[in-house]
Image: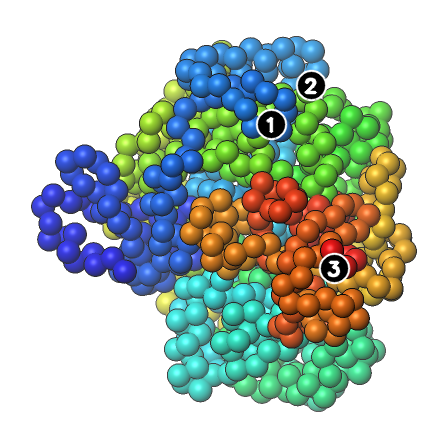
Amino acid sequence: MPNPALYRNDPTVRIVTGACPHDCPDTCSWQIAVDRKDGRALDIWGHPDHPVTQGTLCGKVDRYLERVYHADRLRHPQRRVGPKGSGRFERISWNEALAGIAARLREIIDAWGAEAVLPYSYAGTMGWLQQHGMSDRFFQQMGASRLARTICSEAGFEGYLYTIGSTIGIEPEDFAHARLILIWGSNTLTSNLHLWPFIQAARKQGARVIVIDPARTRTARAADEWLPLRPGTDGALALALMHEIIDAGLHDGDYVAAYTVGFEQLAQRVQEWTPQRAAEITGIPAERISRLAREYATTRPAAIRVNYGMQRHYGGGMAMRNITCLPALVGAWRERGGGIQLSTSGQLRQLETTGLQRPDLQQGRIPRTINMNRLGDALSLDRTRLATAHYAPRPVDRKPSPAAAGPPVKALIVYNSNPAAVTPDQAAVQAGLAREDLFTVVLEHFQTDTADYADYLLPATTQAEHWDLQRMYGHHYLALNRPAITPVAETRPNSAIFRGLAQAMGYTDSAFYEDDETVLRNFVAAQNHPLYEPVTWDALLEKGFVRLNLPQPFLPFAQGNFPTPSGKCEFYSERMARDGYDPLPTYTPPNSVAGGQWTLAGGNGEERANGARGARAVDSTLACISPPAHSFLNSSFSNLERFRGREKEPLLWIHPQDASVRRIDDGARLRVWNGLGEVRLTARVTDDIMAGTVLAPGIWWNKHSVDGRNVNQLTPQDETDMGASGSFYDVRVHVERV
């Protein structure tokens, strides 16, 4: 463990405050010690004064400097010299790279139009500038296709928004005041570590912690109770809880009458959702469902931490909606420590971003929008599949006909993502990336699976080397990241790379000539909502992080004031009805229900375009989920030896009952397959996973897997019920010993 006090008293060292860039609700503030003489970073630790970070970093980010200075770090621009996918490159200058890329993009735009260019990015950094700022300006000036960034959370967000109106919830600090905490579909100790001290503080005051999850995760082991349920059945459980609460008269009648709409219709709907019915679906005994309902309704305050894992199936949006009804039903919002948290990012909706992203550069054009989950379809030259790749997030939305789908994707620019490893239907994605006529540019720290397919490979800076303003979605502190060191070798920030590309393309707007610090200063100065009154450039420079202008305690819905059309929590939603949904909570089963609908889709365009819905599942298949491995963050960190060593090898958790009938021993080599592909994994026989379900921790890079594939070989491009999000946990597989 670092000792910050030693560095603070050392005149040869300067300490620079920054913030973790990764896709995690904790958005930790950090400090880096830098040698004043040679400019090298010496150590990193969590900022001791940040109320959530509290001086600690997770086991991954605590070793962030290993990433910065790793021997495999990309250091110079490169151009492909071998076949697509071979990973063979030659070193070139930045001038050669920018000029060559610009020339090729101009050729494609002249021949096919700007929509033939597709940006592909997600949350490799959560910073406003390096994730969105200059890149958004660049693609809007060009008129490129838009990307619907739906891969993670859109289903849950939509279900939450229909009910509550915004992703606003309990502050992490207030979990310390709860007396019952339901951790629902979240592995807090792996993916939200800094919430755990507040949960522990609650336990010291007598709180019980119950984890609802198909797997006995680290968090479930540390909790008071683990309630295993079948993947994708969370919505049925929530309906049964509401049935029991209303049937027993345990709902908060005053709160419901004053601050909700649709209670009578809800009460009628949930009459049919008895614990016995939900037990058959979820696998949780009816008596335990009944008791959980009474515990939740009568323990005050009661908090729910719900995360994105439980919404990565076809019915994920409706499942989140059902769960989000619970706090209003029992009046949990009245008290500090009561309510629910999915995300705190609803506060960011008040940010003024037009000056940062410059939508005016579109000049009135409305390019098509491609769903990032359907990259395999988007990169296909089959027009039926290309049409299917268009973004249509609601039932009332319609995808275009093949004739109206627009030009094929002829150029792909990838940054902040590793789609060859992380996207669904991996074989389809790799087939698209291997197209010789697809011009691909990749901005990266390391030579990822995606980078192997690049025509130009551009070295990007890490968070230690550039400016940014970090968004948060697990607390209420915006954080400034100051560069601690000069960029390693010839690496450049994403912002500088897109600025250089814009200039090489001949774009003359002043938006492409502002330096990073100016962009961020102007972004901060543009905020005029009272919520951001304390967030000034000087305050960020002085401390590194600033709390939004919210009261403490923050009780957002103690007296209603929900940001919905009615101003109330909407058990019945007119907006849902207009969008083509059932306006009341209901149960939307996953595609992968046992004996049911999914998976042996073939490889032709029509079958892939229609997804796997309606195909007959084979009785011997198992439901498969693929949550993050403890030492990885999506595909980040999984290339570093330390973290691969901790995880050892790609595994498949399988229950002893399922292993026995397949004659699988612990440590056996397995073939895991379905109609989309196959992958080789090693068996971990354990009762930490429900019978009938297997779990493959991810995401391993393909090149670090025994057969050059990972679990996303098995993941369909099917979309969720809301938001057209990814259905990573809605998969059925065959498993056999090799």
Q: Spatial distance from mark 1 to mark 2, Cα to Cα?
A: 16 Å
Q: How packed is label 3: few (under 14 Cα within 10 Å), some, or many (20 or more)? A: some
Residue that badge 3 annotates: 737
Q: Percent position (x, y) of residue 344?
A: 49, 58
Which amino acid lies under the numbered mark 3 shown in the image of this protein? Arg
Residue that badge 1 annotates: 86
Q: Secondary structure at mark 2?
A: loop
- The colour scheme used here is rainbow
Instruction: State whether residue 18 appears in this view.
Output: yes
Location of the C terminus (image quadrant): bottom right
Residue nearer the viewer, 539 or 240: 240
Verify CB contact (< 8 Å) between mark 1 and mark 2.
Answer: no
Q: Please tell me whether residue 67 is drawn above or below residue 255 in the rendered image.
A: above
Q: How packed is label 2: few (under 14 Cα within 10 Å), some, or many (20 or more)? A: few
Instruction: State whether residue 238 appears in this view.
Output: no
Verify CB contact (< 8 Å) between mark 1 and mark 3.
Answer: no
Which badge, 1 or 2, comes first in the chain's sequence?
1
Q: Secondary structure at mark 1?
A: loop
Label of residue 437 in the image: 2
Q: Secondary structure at mark 3?
A: strand
The answer to whether 311 appears left or right of 629 in the picture is right
